[in-house]
Image: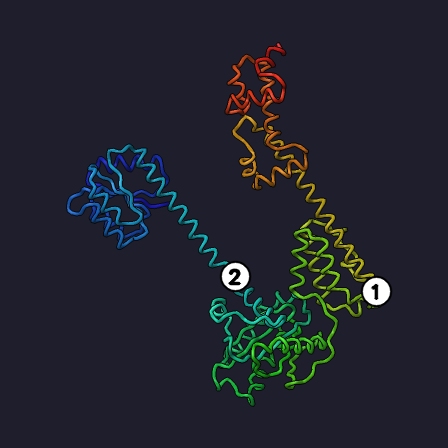
Amino acid sequence: MYRMLVVDDEPLIVNSLCSSIEQNFDVELYRANSAFNAMTLLQKMRFDVVITDISMPVMNGLELLKWIRGVWPQCYVLLLTAYDKFDYAYESMKYDRVQYILKVESYAVIHQSIQNILDKLDDEKKQEQAFIQLGSYMEQMKPLMKADMASRLLRFGVPLPGQDLLDSVGFDIRREEETCIVVGMPGDNSPLYVSTVFSEVAALSMNRLSRRDLRAECVPVGSYIVWFLQRCSAEAGDEATWTAVLCDAFEELPDVLEEKNDMRLMLATDACMHPADDLKNIFTRLTTVLEQERNESGMRILPPGEDPPAAVAPGLDMDQVMLLWEALKTGEQEDFRRMLSEGIRHLAVVTDITQTLPSATISAVTFLYMSAAGLYGLSDKNVSPEIRGLGHLSGQQWITGILNAFDRIFEEKQQLRQSGDAGIAEAVRVYVAEHFTEDIHLTTLAEHFHYSPSYLSRLYKKMTGDNLTGAINNQRIVHARSLLEHTALPVGEVARQSGFYSTKYFLQLFKKKTGMTPSQYRKNTD
C-alpha cells in the first residue's frame, strides 16, 4: 500500500480532499496543516506521494517541494494552487516527479492525476522487482557460467573470456597466469551424480586450499570435478615443493569422503603449471588415467610428460545429455535418434552389456528416459525393460531396445499433444457458445487462453476445420435468427443482443449467410 500526505493550511480543504481520496483509492493517508508539520512527518517516514498547496504561510509549497527533494528524491509531489500563475508552473517544472494542478479543477481531474502517479509507482515497483529477480538470477547463473567456461576450455580448447567477465562471475583465476589442474572422478561419474555431490566435495576441498596462498577454483565439468590452482606468491610453493602442497590439500580428501559418505573419489594431476592453451591436452591426459582406474579411490600424481594409457570407449557427456534432453522436449525425433545412436554405437560390439557398459552411459540414458517418462506421465508398466533391468543382452540388442523405447516416448508425446490441442479447441468452442453476445474476438480469446492470436486461430482450424472468427459470427447469426423468429425486437436490438456492435455489419453478414435481410427472414418465418 502506498503512503500519501496531504498538506494545506485550510483544514476544510484537507478534510474534504482526504475524504475524497479515501473513497477512491486504497492508500495509507496522512494529513498536515502546514509545511512544518509535513516536514515533521517526512522526517519520520517515507512517503510515496505528497499533495500540497503552494500558497501557505511561513513556508510555501514550492519551498516544501525543494526540501522534499533533498530528503525523499523519489517522492511524487502534486502541487495545488488557487492561482493560475506562470511563475508557479515554471518553478515546479524544474523538478522531476512533480505535477501542477489548479484547485478550481474538479476532483475528477485530481483523481486522474493521483491515479497516473499510482500507476507509475506500480510500474516502478515491477521494474524494481524485475531488477531484484535479475540480480538473484545472475547469482544463480554464476556457477553455471563458471562451469561452462571451464568446460569449453578443457574439452574444446576455447580460450577463457576476458578478465573482466571472469571476475564478474567470480571465477577466481588470472587469465594470463599459468595454472595447475587437479581432476576428480567420483565412483559413479554420471553428470547427474556429479551435480549432486559437487557442493560437498567443493566445500571440503576449498576449505583445505584456503590455508594456502593460492587462487583456487572448483567447478564441475561434465562427469568430472576440476580444480584450477594458481600461486599468489612464491610462498605458495616453488617447483620443488608444489607436489607437497597438492598432497597436503588433496591427499586425504578421498579418505574423508569415503568414511563420511561412502563415496569413492579418484584424483589425478601432473603437479605442473601450464599455460591456458595447454590445459585441454592436460585434461584429456588426466581423464584418460581416471577412466582406467574407475571405481578406485585415492590420488595419482603423474610424472611430467608420462604417456597416458590407451583411451577407453567414449560415453555420453553432459553436453550431449543436455542436447538430447532439448531434442526430447521439442519433439525433434530424428535429431534425437541420430545423436543418441552416435553416443552409444561403440557398444554394438559388446557381447554382454552388463559386463562392459560404462556406468556413465547407463546413468545418462536412464536419466533421460525417466525424466521424459515423468514429463509425459508414463506409468511404471510402460517403462522399457532395457531401463528396468539390462539382463544379459548383447550391445546391439540393448541399443535397439533403447532406441525403440525412446521412439515410444515420442509417440506418447505426439498423442498427448493431439489430445491437448483437441481439449483447447473444445474449451474455445464452449467459451464462444457462452460469451458470443459479448465483445469477444480473436485477440480477446487469445488473451483469455494465453496463446498468440495466430497460433490459436491455426490450432482451432486444424482441430475443427472452421475459422475461429467465422465460428464466432456463425454463433451470433444462429442467435439472431432465433430472435427474429421468436421476438418482435427491432433489427438493431437483435444485432446488439447477438453480439454485433455495428448494425450495418450485421445486415451485411446476415444477408451473406442467409441470402436474405433480417426483415425478409422474419417475414418468411411468420
515 is higher (above) or lower (below) than 375? above
| 14 versus 345 height, above or below | above
Tell me the crowding category of disc 1: few under 14, some 14 to 19, or many 20 or more residues within 10 angstroms, Cα based: some
Q: Position of residue 312 (x, y in %)?
A: 74, 74
Question: Could you tell me residue 285's position as x and y percent?
Answer: 66, 78
Q: CA distance from mark 2 to mark 1?
A: 43 Å
Label 2 sits on residue: 140
Q: Is residue 182 visible?
A: yes
Amino acid beneath label 1: Ser
Q: Residue 181 in the image: x percent, y percent?
A: 59, 78
Tell me the residue at 61%/29% (across/down).
470
Which of the 4 quarters of the picture holds residue 417? Answer: top right
Image disc number at residue 347: none
Between 15 and 324, which is closer to the camera in this rendering?
Answer: 324
Q: Which residue does the numbered mark 1 point to in the structure image? A: 394
Quadrant including the C terminus:
top right
Please state the total of marks drawn on the protein image.
2
- Location of residue 189 by image quarter: bottom right
Identify the image quadrant of the N terminus. Answer: top left
Check contact, mark 2 vs mark 1: CB within 8 A: no
- SS of the residue under disc 2: helix
Query: What secondary structure is marked by label 1?
Result: loop
Which residue ends up furthest to the left in the rendered image?
58
Tell me if I can see residue 33 in this picture: no
The correct choice, above or below, for 144 with respect to 54 in the image is below
Give the x, y percent position of residue 25: 36, 38
| Three-letter residue code for mark 2 | Gln
> Is 142 displayed left or right of 331 in the figure?
left
